C-alpha cells in the first residue's frame, strides 16, 4: 500500500450533498467508489470490477427447462 502526504482540499455543496474535488494525483480509477467512515476518518476506495466470468461462476445453474414456444417466426417480407 502506497501512502502520500496529505493535501489540503476544500469541501463544497452540490445540491444537498457535501462534495470534495479530488486532485489529479489522487484520482481513483473508474466511475464508482465505496466510501465508509472509520471513526473520524472517511475512507474512499475504488469499486473493484468483477469480471463477468467470475460473476457467472458464482451463480447456481438453472434446473428448470426452457418452455417450448408455439409461436413460429414471421415469414420474410420482400420490400
Image: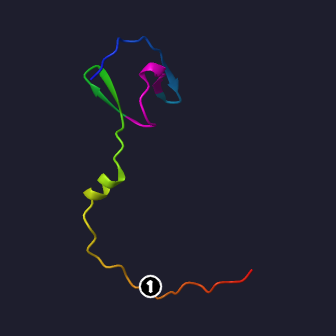
Q: Nearer the viewer, residue 68 or 11?
A: 68
Does the magenta portion include 19?
A: yes
Extent of the magenta region: 18-33
> Quadrant location of the N terminus?
top left
Classify 24 as above or below 56: above
Determine the image quadrant of residue 64.
bottom left
Q: Secondary structure beneath disc 1? A: loop
Q: Is residue 42 left or right of residue 30?
A: left
Instruction: Estimate the x, y position of residue 30 in percent, counting from the top left.
Output: 44, 36
Classify 51 as above or below 16: below
Q: Which residue is mark 1?
A: 69
Q: Nearer the viewer, residue 78 or 13?
A: 78
Instruction: Estimate the x, y position of residue 68 in percent, counting from the top left.
Output: 40, 85
Instruction: Estimate the x, y position of residue 22 in percent, counting from the top left.
Output: 46, 22
> Quadrant location of the C terminus?
bottom right
Classify 49 as above or below 27: below
Q: Nearer the viewer, residue 20 or 76?
A: 76
- The colour style of the image is rainbow
Crowdedness of circle 1 by 10 Å Cα count: few (<14), some, many (20+)? Answer: few
Q: Nearer the viewer, residue 15 or 50?
A: 50
Determine the image quadrant of residue 66.
bottom left
Q: Is residue 45 left or right of residue 12?
A: left
Residue that lies at the very extreme toward the right in this rendered image: 79
Instruction: Estimate the x, y position of residue 25 in percent, counting from the top left.
Output: 44, 19
Q: Residue at x 26, y 67 (%)?
A: 61
Amino acid at each position: 500500500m502506497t501512502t502520500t502526504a496529505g493535501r489540503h482540499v476544500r469541501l463544497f455543496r452540490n445540491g444537498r450533498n457535501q462534495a470534495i474535488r479530488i486532485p489529479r494525483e489522487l484520482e481513483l480509477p473508474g466511475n464508482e467508489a465505496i466510501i465508509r467512515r472509520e471513526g473520524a476518518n472517511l475512507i474512499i476506495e475504488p469499486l473493484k470490477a468483477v469480471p463477468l466470468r467470475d460473476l457467472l461462476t458464482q451463480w447456481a445453474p438453472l434446473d428448470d427447462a426452457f418452455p417450448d414456444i408455439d409461436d413460429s417466426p414471421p415469414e420474410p417480407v420482400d420490400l
